[in-house]
Amino acid sequence: MKSEAIEVGVTKAKDSSTQKGVKRGVYIPDFILRVVALVTTLASAIIMATTNETLPFATRFIRFRAVYYDLPTLTFFVVANFVVSGYLLLSLPLSIFNVVRSRAKNSRILLIIFDTVMLDLLMAGASAAAAIVYLAHNGNTITNWFAICRQFYSFCRRISGSLIGSFVGVAVLILLILMSASALSRRN
């Protein structure tokens, strides 16, 4: 009878330690993905904010210039990426807390809520900027908007690269939300 009770206790202890290891196995990639999203959104914001190109015209006094802040949509894109980067930086300690204390449920719910809000903000900024980048590359002949990328090649290349980085951040945030939700559902 005693040996059966000891075996049951040992089995429960093994199951508990295995479950704890599985939960930590979910939260460590969460931390790594937050760092990846932080790097991509911060890089996107910095690349867009430092993008400008000036083309000389017939004289040296007249020049054409392309700068991100000439278009409010690209300004919104930069601000959205900086806000999301700041949030991701501030969420890293909470993510570490979830690695250490894998049973913390309220902090995980809080992260899911804020991750969703930041996903919405980042998606809005990236989608709006994607429309401007499309117009910059292709123009719109019906409204007489000309494609500027034939003249401002460096500017267009940089804003396109910045947009790709932001959409990588969107994908990582979606993955973070799904991982957090699945970790919470497994716990109950």
Image: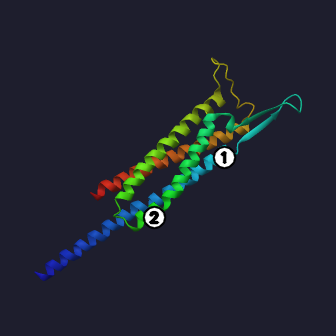
Foreground of the two, 4 or 82: 82
Please tell me the numbered disc located at residue 47: 1
Rendered location of residue 139, percent (x, y): 65, 25
Say if 132 sits above or below 188 in the image.
above
Q: Amino acid at mark 2?
A: Ile
Rendered location of residue 91, percent (x, y): 48, 57
Which comes sooner in the sequence, label 1 or label 2? Answer: 1
Rendered location of residue 26, percent (x, y): 39, 60
Tell me the crowding category of disc 2: few under 14, some 14 to 19, or many 20 or more residues within 10 angstroms, Cα based: some
In which quadrant is the C terminus drawn?
bottom left
SS for callout 1: helix
Q: How is the image coloured?
A: rainbow
Q: Amino acid at mark 1?
A: Ile
Say if 147 sits above or below 52 in the image.
above
Say if 140 sits above or below 1 in the image.
above
Residue 172 left/right relative to 14: right
Read off the residue under disc 2: 96
